[in-house]
Image: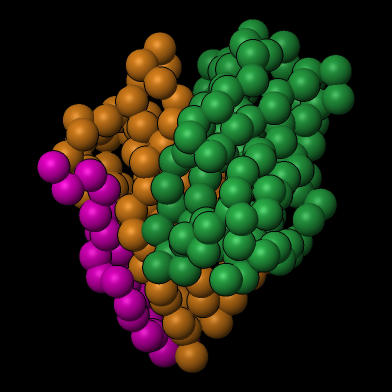
Chain colours: A orange, B green
Amino acid sequence: NAGVTQTPKFRVLKTGQSMTLLCAQDMNHEYMYWYRQDPGMGLRLIHYSVGEGTTAKGEVPDGYNVSRLKKQNFLLGLESAAPSQTSVYFCASSSIPGQGYEQYFGPGTRLTVT
Amino acid sequence: AQKVTQAQTEISVVEKEDVTLDCVYETRDTTYYLFWYKQPPSGELVFLIRRNSFDEQNEISGRYSWNFQKSTSSFNFTITASQVVDSAVYFCALRHSGAGSYQLTFGKGTKLSVIP
């Protein structure tokens, strides 16, 4: 039982390049989330999904897109990377309300945009 | 609007000392959930505890204890007899339970350093 996994662990991009971060969970959770963590800022929600085929914007969605084609996967895309997107990205998942609200996090992806 | 404040940015203690990490939250909701997460130097986020707004009982888990007080909107975390392995950044987070309430609002974290 791997929990939440993220690919890749590290990435360096040049400004304007695109990339996709992959998140996978094997806990059969309905909800999935993408956060970014910046020094002194805590974690901020980028996008989330409440089920396969659904996505919604979080607190800081600009410059990112997401897709949830399969229940176990949640993809985060950067179409044209900017230095302001240098951050550590965390994926998380949680079960439906009533079965616990805690979110379980992946190990993170450290992205640097030069 | 929801807000979580962790006023202590960094704390250093000597091993075996007790330490309390403060968390103050703001919410207009009557039903909500509070969490603590630990982020060790390796970077992953580890879930520690969840507490709902109806349950004000304090909780103890080994050397960890949590003090939830609705009257002061606080959910403080105490580590007794601290150990070097407790060195980490600790985040307090808030989630309300209404429809569409999928977001965890995190505090900015408290970095705890336990010195041997």
Task: Determine if residue A59 is in view.
Answer: no
The residue at the far left in this view is A1
Percent position of residue A52, x then y:
25, 32
State yes or no: residue B108 in magenta.
no
In this rendering, does residue B38 appear at all? yes
Question: In terms of depth relative to the viewer, which is nearer, B45 or B97?
Answer: B45
In the shown orientation, is residue A56 left or right of residue A92?
right
- The percent position of residue B89, horizontal first and vertical second, equals 58, 59
Q: Residue at x 58, y 23 (%)?
A: B59
Q: Which residues are magenta?
A: A1-23
Q: Tell me which residue sits at (44%, 31%) in the image.
A: A102
Q: Position of residue A55 (x, y in %)?
A: 39, 38
Using the image as rendered, state which of residue A47 and residue B16 is in the foreground. B16
Percent coordinates x, y for residue B61 in the rendering: 49, 31
| Residue at horizontal 24 percent and vertical 54 percent from the top | A5
Could you tell whether B111 is left or right of A7 in the image? right
The answer to whether residue B37 is above or below residue A82 is above
Residue drawn at (52%, 64%), measured in percent from left and top?
Answer: B84
Left or right of residue A71: residue A105: right
| Residue A57 vs residue B26, the one in the foreground | B26
The image quadrant of residue B9 is bottom right
Quadrant containing the N terminus of chain A in the rendered view: top left
Q: Residue furthest top?
A: B54
Would you place residue B18 above or below residue A93 in this image? below
Seen in the image, is B111 located left or right of residue A9? right
The image quarter in which residue B10 lies: bottom right
Between A21 and B72, the residue placed more toward the observer is B72
Q: Is residue A83 above or below residue B26?
A: below
Question: How many numbered dots are placed on residues in this image?
Answer: 0
Quadrant of the rendered structure where residue B109 is?
bottom right
